[in-house]
Image (tube, rainbow, N blue to C red):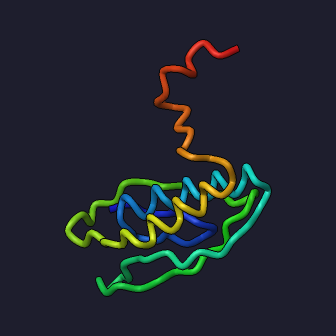
Amino acid sequence: MKHIHYDSSMILTSDDVADAVIEYAAALAGGDRADTVDVPAVAEDGTMTTTKILIGPSSEIVIEDADEDELEVEDREFVARLRAAAKTFGHNEPIHADTRSDLTDAD
């Protein structure tokens, strides 16, 4: 599970959903576009909910690990839809600059 920090809110969701949201945010920023996204989440009482967020070029989104691993959200359709949407901006895969060895010593 991960927390998505967005504005003053903290959204508890699955690892895959959080990763898809931040990858989509990067794609939107690269395309100078914005979109609203209904993020599948876990409410404070443990029930499933949805949180709508606006993602755009100036969005400040932070993802961090959460302790609540037993509540894993499964939403493969959401993840697939966001990743497909990100590809429409010409990005077939996330860049992941912090883990790519081919980007070392790039001047």
Residue drawn at (76%, 54%) of the image? 31
All told, the count of numbered labels is: 0
| Residue 104 horizontal/vertical position (percent) | 56, 17
**For this rendering, which residue is in front, 23 or 9?**
23
Left or right for 74, reference 52: left
| Residue 102 horizontal/vertical position (percent) | 53, 20
- Which quadrant would residue 105 be assigned to in this image? top right
As displayed, is residue 43 above or below residue 17?
below
As displayed, is residue 17 above or below residue 87?
below
Left or right for 52, reference 54: left
**For this rendering, which residue is in front, 61 or 107?**
107
| Residue 56 horizontal/vertical position (percent) | 72, 63
- Which quadrant would residue 54 be assigned to in this image? bottom right
Residue drawn at (49%, 27%) of the image? 100
Judged from this view, the residue extending furthest toward the left is 70
| Image quarter hosting the C terminus | top right
- Which quadrant would residue 32 be assigned to in this image? bottom right
Residue drawn at (46%, 55%) of the image? 19
Judged from this view, the residue extending furthest toward the right is 32
Left or right for 82, reference 18: right
| Image quarter hosting the N terminus | bottom left
